[in-house]
């Protein structure tokens, strides 16, 4: 695998290239090229009701069913659940996942904010990923199962995730975590939470070793080129993202506020954030905004590693049907190595 620090590398799996010009003379190559297992999964969805046309509870169950049916053998791990509450708000669950047999060992910690458009996703949908990351990183994953939208709207999810991050930082030993070795990570809308919470952590003096964002949401502006190219998918569509945003944002909230759209943070605010890994995928409406945010981090002087994975789709790190595909296994390995390299020695 080839990555370039402070710039965006394009990783073609299983072979390495530096991208494909879609306007090249070789017109027999379609815009979307997917690895075989990934293509089979996308083909299996034909004829199904789009997620944005379902009631919220049914949509949540669709993702749970997809993950349950597609689950592969998961690494052994010790899993525990605790309940959190921020002020007088709703109670929500937090899970810790640590490598099997390490309960008496202080390990680095990674507080994780999950994707699913603020509406979908829970520990069940992300357990395989948490176990993979815990095992390969040899760290404790702290998974925040925040209150979903639209039942709870912005900024509830940001407040809940930051409260857990702050509590873990101040009470690391309770989780078997070395307080000097703490990172944050998240996928999709969880990437938005990573960006916003990293800025808040810097402002409040909460130290972080690094941050990881998988195909992050960074703006409520749905007009990028990748939104035009992949508006109908595969997997994530423009209509679904609009549905997610409508569920998340209260009426009257300024969608350009950086706490909503972190791509709008200025360079001074982004300066001195912890080293970042931003992973994107080629066939994704969110591709351009994720890579734009990586570029803004770089321009702000943040040590940034950006990698684009080809032949896959949005959610490729999380989706269990993709678990053994080259892009997914490579991205998890890259992430584990990045986290290990940046934990305070």
Image (cartoon, rainbow, N blue to C red):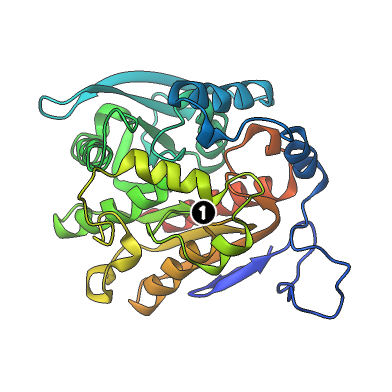
Is 144 situated left or right of 75 in this image? left
Give the quadrant of the C terminus: bottom left
In the displayed structure, would residue 267 be above or below residue 104? below
- Residue occupying the point 41% across, 24% down: 103
Is 243 situated left or right of 133 in this image? left
Q: Pointer 1: residues within 10 angstroms few (<14), some, or many (20+)? A: many
- Residue occupying the point 36% across, 34% down: 106
In the displayed structure, would residue 80 be above or below residue 24? above
Q: Quadrant of residue 162?
A: top left
Q: How far across and how far down the image is residue 16, in percent?
A: 76, 67
Q: How far across and how far down the image is residue 26, in percent?
A: 87, 75
Secondary structure at badge 1 equals: loop
Q: Nearer the viewer, residue 115 or 8?
A: 115
Q: Nearer the viewer, residue 223 or 117?
A: 223
- Residue occupying the point 51% across, 57% down: 286
In the displayed structure, would residue 287 be above or below residue 175? below
- Residue occupying the point 89% across, 68% down: 28
Q: How far across and how far down the image is residue 262, in percent?
A: 32, 60
Residue that extends furthest to the left in the rendered view of this protein: 87
Is 172 situated left or right of 288 in this image? left
Q: Is residue 210 visible?
A: yes
Q: Quadrant of residue 4?
A: bottom right
**Number of numbered labels in the structure image:** 1
Give the quadrant of the N terminus: bottom right
Name the residue that disc number 1 marks.
Answer: 215
Q: How far across and how far down the image is residue 323, in percent?
A: 68, 37
Q: Nearer the viewer, residue 152 or 183?
A: 152
Q: Nearer the viewer, residue 125 or 32?
A: 32
Q: Is residue 101 visible?
A: no
């Amino acid at each position: 695998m080839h990555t370039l620090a402070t710039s965006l590398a394009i990783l073609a799996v299983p072979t390495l290239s530096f991208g494909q010009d879609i306007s090249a003379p070789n017109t027999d190559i379609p815009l979307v090229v997917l690895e075989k297992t990934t293509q089979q999964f996308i083909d299996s969805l034909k004829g199904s009701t789009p997620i944005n046309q379902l009631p919220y509870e049914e949509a949540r169950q669709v993702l749970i069913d997809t993950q349950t049916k597609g689950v592969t053998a998961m690494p052994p791990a010790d899993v525990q659940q605790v309940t959190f509450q921020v002020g007088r708000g709703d109670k929500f669950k937090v899970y810790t996942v640590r490598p099997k047999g390490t309960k008496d060992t202080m390990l680095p910690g990674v507080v994780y904010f999950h994707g699913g458009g603020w509406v979908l996703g829970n520990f069940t949908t992300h357990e395989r990923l948490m176990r993979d990351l815990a095992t390969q990183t040899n760290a404790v994953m702290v998974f925040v199962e925040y209150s979903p939208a639209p039942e709870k709207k912005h900024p509830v999810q940001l407040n809940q995730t930051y409260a857990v991050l702050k509590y873990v930082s101040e009470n690391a030993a309770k989780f078997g975590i070395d307080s000097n070795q703490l990172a944050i990570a998240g996928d999709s809308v969880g990437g938005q939470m990573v960006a916003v919470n990293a800025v808040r952590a810097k402002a409040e003096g909460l130290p972080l070793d690094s941050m990881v964002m998988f195909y992050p949401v960074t703006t409520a502006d749905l007009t990028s080129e990748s939104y035009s190219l992949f508006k109908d998918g595969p997997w994530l569509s423009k209509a679904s993202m609009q549905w997610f945003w409508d569920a998340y944002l209260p009426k009257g909230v300024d969608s350009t506020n950086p706490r909503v759209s972190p791509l709008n943070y200025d360079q001074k605010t982004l300066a001195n954030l912890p080293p970042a890994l931003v992973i994107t995928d080629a066939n994704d409406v969110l591709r351009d905004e994720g890579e734009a945010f990586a570029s803004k981090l770089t321009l702000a002087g943040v040590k940034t590693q950006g990698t684009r994975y080809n032949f896959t789709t949005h959610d490729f790190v999380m989706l269990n049907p993709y678990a053994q595909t080259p892009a997914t296994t490579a991205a998890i390995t890259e992430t584990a190595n990045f986290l290990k390299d940046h934990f305070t020695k």
